[in-house]
Image (cartoon, rainbow, N blue to C red):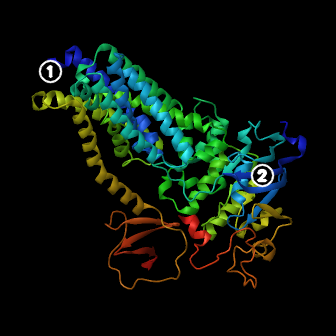
Amino acid sequence: MTGHAGGSALDVENASVAISGRPILRRLDFSVAHGEFVALMGANGSGKSTFVRAMTGLRPLSGGSVRLFGTDISQFRDWQRLGFVPQRASAVSGVPTSVWEVVASGRLTRRRWLRPLLGKDRAAINDALEVVGISDLAKRGIGNLSGGQQQRVLIARALAGEPDLFFLDEPTAGVDLPNKEALAHALAVLKDRGATVVLVAHELGPMARLVDRAVVMRDGRIAYDGAPLADHEVHGPLFGDAHTHHHDHVDGGTTRDHVPHMASPVDTAPDEEAAR
Amino acid sequence: MSILTLDFMIRAMIAAAFTGLAAPVVGTYLVQRRLSLMGDGIGHIAVTGVALGLLTGASPTWTAVGVAIVGAVIIELIREREHANGDLALALLFYGGIAGGVLITGIAGQSAARLQEFLFGSITTMSAGDVWVTMVLAAVVVLIGIGLSPQLFAVAQDQEFARVTGLNIRFYNILVAVLAAVSVTVAMRTVGLLLVSALMIVPVATSQQLTRSFRSTLFGAMLLGLVASFGGLMIATFAADGELAPGPTIVLLALACFALTWPLGIWLRHRRRKAEPCDSLPPLAHETIEEHPHQHGEDCGHEAIQHGDHVDYVHDGHRHAPHGVHYDEH
């Protein structure tokens, strides 16, 4: 593998992303070493998901570069080294689908056209089900599972391709504590196996003990990059006021730099405007 | 019975069998993408294709294939741009297709009766050449639809995930659109353009009443498509002195299959849900049931549910768990 040349699994340099001409992410520098477990945190709308989408090639960059294992993403072909858990409330589609089938679709990176599932593919799928603790659900229809169990299916799907670098986009959103514990256990197994993990999360909960480094985003830029933070620190005054219910900001709401203020009662609030 | 040995009837049976097998293959992927009406949209567009054939004197089958493919690709591209489910794109092309078809047929000086053959099917008037085209196209659809099923499944299941696994999702999206267009034109002669979608979608709807996995849904739908298509042709041939048109008979038979399986599906899902093991959390407290003359056991008439390491029995809306000589409330 050529990947180890740079010494890091992921290198983002000066990356920017614009959506419909509007700059969303501006000049981000970020790198993740092999085997590192990074938590990407921040308020809603701070650009975490967009950043993950840029790093997985789902969102084109408007500037800068993303390198995966030393290869620029536009040249990158080793997709089996990447495991992606998109942000989904559910894995249900229009046709009944078994857990096994969803997880097996994660094995596609390692299969060729028209080649049936081989023994090693089945072994990897079974192992993935085992790691997230849903082996007994393999035959079940995905529609009958709880939200937390569906999240575990999505993680197993990413695991089935035996990747080295994982991107998980809020796998714990709307998941109860026992399921969070199960996810944390699965991620611990991955970490022990030497996987590199970029985990987007609002609150880490039981996963906090796995995190080597925390990165906090605020308004499309990286506001903090360093030692792991406790959940409440992420929403501290340094990082913006998205979760105002946690704190009473004396100067609440004065951070809207370029947004026009409401001038008269007849004006519509910007939010209402956007909702139309 | 001698009618079955007549040439036109043999051709009709072959065409019905191939169409019945092929149409639900693409239908399954369309239902998975929640695009059940796409077949209808393409069918409407293909009307213009047929009319172009009538106008130019070219084979209506081939002009229909061409126009349907172009229309399907346009639908797919609009869908991709708009990030919507293609609902609006379908509607726009629906109307354009049917209006264009009727207009051009008029210009070509053809009667409405000629167009009707394609709108409602005319399986018994197929030529040997038509049957060959049907067989080849149907075989191509089935081979691609099953051979590339892991890829097509992944793309339809979760586009973003599929893209990060390195699949060229645009290629597969357009492939499905083209396969849908081909299926529509294949089924055109059997059930007609206005009923094409029924043969693609109804067997899938029927099949998924009974299945839990994609694979069994796909193969079940193919089998049901074959039964409906072939059975419908037989009913049309032998019932009511041959007064029944084969196309509508096939579709109504497919719908009858659905009507029969639907209650069964509801019952099956109900039963599965009831038999699911309940959460293995221990009960809040040790709550003993006072007097319980009934002895719970296998086939005691009370629903048995797995609960952790033991079995609970559903009794009047609560769960009784055997504990030594008495029962506990769980």
Image quadrant in which the N terminus of chain B is located: top left
Q: What element carries label 1?
A: loop
Q: On the picture, is B227 further left or further right than B287? A: left
- In the rendered image, which quarter is residue A90 located in? bottom right
Q: Given the current orientation, which residue lies at the most extreme left position?
A: B241
State the residue position of label 2. Answer: A16
Circles 1 and 2 on the same subunit = no
Identify the amino acid type marked 2: Ser
Residue A31 x %, y %: 84, 52
Please give the name of the residue rendered at 39% of the width and 22% of the height, measured from the top-left corner. B63
Q: Is residue B7 visible?
A: yes
Tag 2 subunit:
A
Q: Is B63 situated above or below A74?
A: above
Q: Nearer the viewer, mark 1 or mark 2?
A: 2
CA distance separating discs 1 and 2: 74 Å
Q: Is A257 situated above or below B49?
A: below
Q: Which mark is drawn over residue B1?
A: 1
Q: What element carries label 2?
A: strand
Identify the amino acid type marked 1: Met
- In the rendered image, which quarter is residue A260 located in? bottom right
Q: Residues within 10 Å of mark 1 (few under 14, many from 20)?
A: few
Tag 1 subunit:
B
Q: Which of B174 and A128 is in front in this view?
A: B174
Residue B98 x %, y %: 33, 35
Residue B189 x %, y %: 30, 26
